[in-house]
Amino acid sequence: MQSSSHGQRLRQSRPASLSVSTRFPSFEDIWLLGSQERDIPLYTRLRSRVRNSQAQEPDDRSLQKFDRLLAQHRRWEVRKAACGTYNCFGHVWASRRTAIYEQAEIETIRRDDGYRVLSVSEIARPGDLAIYYDSQQQSIYHAGVVCELRLAVALDDRPQPATVPWILSKLDDASGEVVHHMNDVHLPDGFAVAIWTDRPEPHA
């Protein structure tokens, strides 16, 4: 994962059950101090206001960082070149129109929009969300959208009978969008991933 100097934390405006790690960096690598607040109207399904801020366009340093990540992750498939305006959470919940930075807003979206964690017996479907946490599932690092299911591949590159989700996500608010294997992410060792869905519970 990136060095700790690159880490971004979701800002917390009120106590939340999920916190953001101060030890590990995340995909949301931004500089909050000195940034200009540029918010747009954004609401949950239950009409709760979601605080947000449109990100600045990437500078040369951000473009170089994205290029380095692509070189490290050869299996990533670029959907969109580096751009500003939105981060991974804005990609998932704001249609690429703005960035969401505060932990409390993610909690509100999860509650108001009716997300639940997929059970182990259920299969992820395109449109479900991959949510990345620390190993204790207390700190959210990243979020992406399940875009397809592909056959698993063994070390000898032979397809396996199982399928795994591939995720479309934006690395941070100054990088591009990539399609990647669910576990091929630039995060600290020991991260956990859960699938969130707004689909109703299956009938027993």
Image: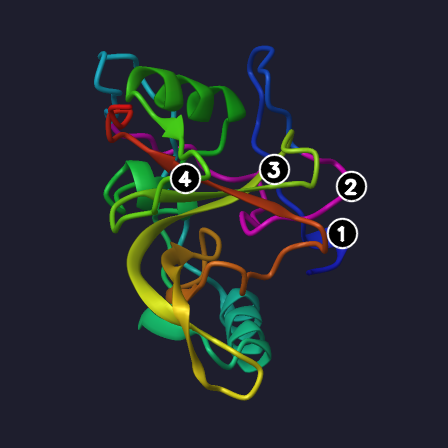
Res 164 → quadrant: bottom left
Amino acid beneath label 3: Leu
Quick one: quadrant of the C terminus?
Answer: top left
Residue 111 visible at all: yes
Q: Which mark is residue 144?
A: none
Q: Is residue 30 magenta?
A: yes
* Label 2 packing within 10 angstroms: few (<14), some (14-19), many (20+): few
Q: Give the number of the mark in front: 2 or 4.
A: 4
The answer to whether residue 42 is above or below residue 170 is: above
Residue 55 visible at all: no
Percent of width and height locating residue 106:
44, 26
In the foreground, 23 or 184: 184
Q: Give the number of the mark in front: 4 or 3.
A: 4
- Do the residues bearing badges 1 and 2 touch, measured as CB atoms within 8 Å? yes
Q: Pointer 1: what residue?
A: 4
- Residues in magenta, as a range: 21-40
* Residue extending furthest toward the front: 204
Distance between mark 1 and mark 4 Cα atoms: 36 Å
